[in-house]
């Protein structure tokens, strides 16, 4: 039976990343996130937000943006 991952994303089943939840794509716009990050404009891509903050997951980007910006 398939188990849904975080935000309906699936877990990788093949090595070397078996069991990890897939990350959101870098081309996702801030305005299209479930809860947009207020420190960034709506048309900012997740890849740009990751570069600015140094975080990889959406939650780590959100936490680091609150501290940095």
Image (cartoon, rainbow, N blue to C red):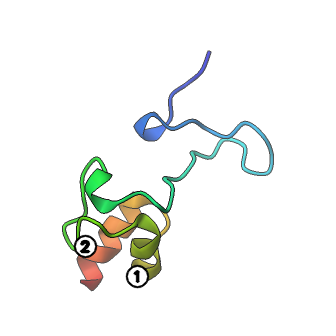
Q: Secondary structure at mark 2?
A: loop
How far is mark 2 from mark 1, CA to CA?
10 Å
The circle drawn on residue 3 is none
Identify the residue position indicated by label 2 in the image: 40
Q: Secondary structure at mark 1?
A: helix
Task: Indicate the position of residue 15 as horizontal and vertical percent values.
Answer: 80, 46
Quarter occupied by residue 3: top right
Does 37 appear above or below 2?
below
Q: Residue at x 28, y 84 (%)?
A: 68
Task: Indicate the position of residue 42 as horizontal and vertical percent values.
Answer: 24, 65
Label 2 close to label 1 by CB (< 8 Å): yes
User: Foreground residue, 29 or 2?
Assistant: 29
Task: Indicate the position of residue 47 as horizontal and vertical percent values.
Answer: 47, 69
Task: Indicate the position of residue 9 as horizontal and vertical percent values.
Answer: 50, 38
User: Foreground residue, 26 or 43?
Assistant: 43
Q: Residue at x 79, y 51 (%)?
A: 16
Packing grade of label 1 (10 A; few <14, some 14-19, many >=20) is some
């Amino acid at each position: 039976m398939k188990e849904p991952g975080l935000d309906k994303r699936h877990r990788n089943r093949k090595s070397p990343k078996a069991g990890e939840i897939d990350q959101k794509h870098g081309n996702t716009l801030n305005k299209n996130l479930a809860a947009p990050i207020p420190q960034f404009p709506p048309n900012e891509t997740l890849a740009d937000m990751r570069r600015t903050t140094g975080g990889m997951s959406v939650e780590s980007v959100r936490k680091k943006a609150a501290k940095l910006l």
